[in-house]
Image: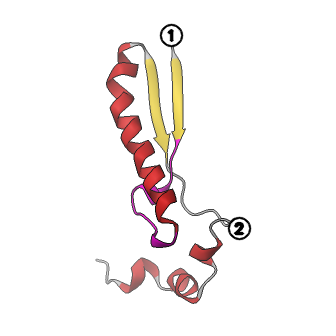
């Protein structure tokens, strides 16, 4: 008892990235798996959570952050949408 399961998903599970479509789909599936396991795990005293980190600058994610559009979005917050 008092066990925990932590599933590592990604922000791509909530907002898929076109450049890494298959990756995004797999992370969305992990979010669904987490939700599907809540009741069976809770009944056995197991806590289950998913974490969804944002983009981490690695070689794998380079296409997402190393281009002109990504650089522009760093200096123009909220993709140019008026907020407030």
Which residue is at the far top? 1
Residue 68 pos. (x, y %) = 58, 89
Using the image as rendered, state which of residue 6 and residue 75 is in the foreground.
6
Q: Is residue 80 left or right of residue 8?
A: left
Quick one: 79 or 59, which is closer to the camera? Answer: 59
Residue bounds of the magenta highlight: 8-19
Helix, strand or loop status at disc 2: loop
Residue 4 in percent (x, y) is at: 52, 24
Disc 2 + disc 1, Cβ < 8 Å:
no
Instruction: Determine the CA span between mark 2 and mark 1.
Output: 40 Å
- In the rendered view, would you say 43 is above or below 21? above
Task: Find the residue positioned furthest to the right.
Answer: 59
How many marks are shown on the rendered structure? 2
In the image, is residue 83 part of the stretch drawn in magenta?
A: no
Residue at 41% across, 46% down: 29
Instruction: Look at the picture and state if 21 lies above or below 29.
Output: below
Residue 33: give its label: none
Residue 79 relative to residue 74: left or right: left
Q: Secondary structure at mark 1?
A: loop
Which x, y percent locates residue 10? 50, 53
Residue where numbered disc 2 is placed: 59
Name the residue: 63% across, 62% down.
56
Quadrant in the picture for residue 44: top left
Task: Report which residue position mark 1 lands on.
Answer: 1
Q: How was this image coloured?
A: secondary structure
Mark 1 or mark 2, which is nearer the start of the sequence?
1
Q: Residue furthest front?
A: 22
**Res 61 → quadrant:** bottom right
Which is more foreground, mark 2 or mark 1?
2
Could you classify mark 2 by the number of other residues whose Cα lies within 10 Å: few (under 14), some (14-19), or many (20 or more)?
Answer: few
């Amino acid at each position: 008892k008092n066990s925990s399961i932590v599933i590592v998903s990604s922000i791509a599970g909530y907002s898929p990235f076109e450049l890494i479509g298959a990756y995004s789909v797999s992370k969305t599936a992990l979010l669904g798996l987490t939700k599907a396991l809540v009741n069976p795990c809770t009944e056995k005293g197991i806590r289950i959570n998913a974490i969804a980190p944002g983009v981490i600058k690695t070689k794998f994610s380079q296409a997402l952050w190393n281009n002109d559009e990504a650089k522009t979005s760093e200096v123009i917050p909220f993709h140019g949408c008026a907020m407030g």
